[in-house]
Image: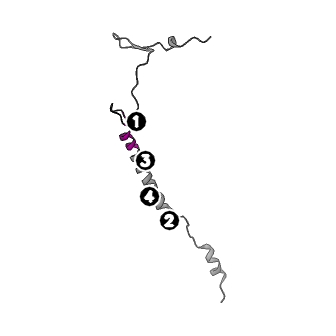
Amino acid sequence: MKRSAAADAEQFYEEKDPEAGLVPLSVICFVLSAILMVVQMFGADAVKSDPTGESPIMVPTANKQDWESKNIVTGVWTNKFKDTLLPIP
């Protein structure tokens, strides 16, 4: 049985994509990982929340520092940070 050169070379030109089934799998994994991230974010918020109502996700409130003072009359804040530093010898 003889094969022609075209039939013999045809086996090398067949386009088979070895990664054809990976695209749907990657989409499913991406969606599941996004859902897991949201669940972990809000799960950590619910478990670690303290009675004061502050959330670990939220930025904490800024507390007044010792070197800051507010003038009650004008409402202007003054900064005495340089006075609190120790002099460098």
4 and 31: which one is in front? Answer: 31
Tell how many labels.
Answer: 4
Which kind of residue does numbered mark 4 sit on?
A: Ile
In the displayed structure image, the side of residue 23 where residue 42 appears, left or right = left
Q: Secondary structure at mark 2?
A: loop
Which kind of residue does numbered mark 3 sit on?
A: Met
Q: Which residue is mark 4?
A: 28
Q: CA distance from mark 1 to mark 4?
A: 30 Å
In the figure, 45 relative to 31: above or below? above
Q: CA distance from mark 4 to mark 3?
A: 14 Å
Q: Earlier in the sequence, mark 1 or mark 4?
A: 4
Q: Which residue is mark 3?
A: 37
- Residue 55 image point, x, y percent: 37, 35
Q: Secondary structure at mark 3?
A: helix
In the displayed structure image, the side of residue 1 where residue 79 appears, left or right = left
24 and 12: which one is in front? Answer: 24
Q: Earlier in the sequence, mark 1 or mark 2?
A: 2
86 inside magenta stretch: no
Q: Which residue is mark 2?
A: 21
Identify which residue is drawn at 46% across, 61% down.
24
Residue 44, quarter of the rendered image: top left
Q: Which mark is residue 56?
A: 1
**The N terminus lies in which quarter of the figure?**
bottom right
Write down the region rendered in magenta: 41-64
Discs 1, 2 touching: Cβ within 8 Å? no
Q: Assess disc 1: are there few (<14), some (14-19) or many (≥20) residues with their C-alpha within 10 Å of its C-alpha.
A: some
Task: Select label 1 or label 3 by which is in front.
Answer: 1
Q: Earlier in the sequence, mark 3 or mark 2?
A: 2
Q: Earlier in the sequence, mark 2 or mark 4?
A: 2
Identify which residue is drawn at 43% across, 47% down.
37
Q: CA distance from mark 3 to mark 2?
A: 25 Å
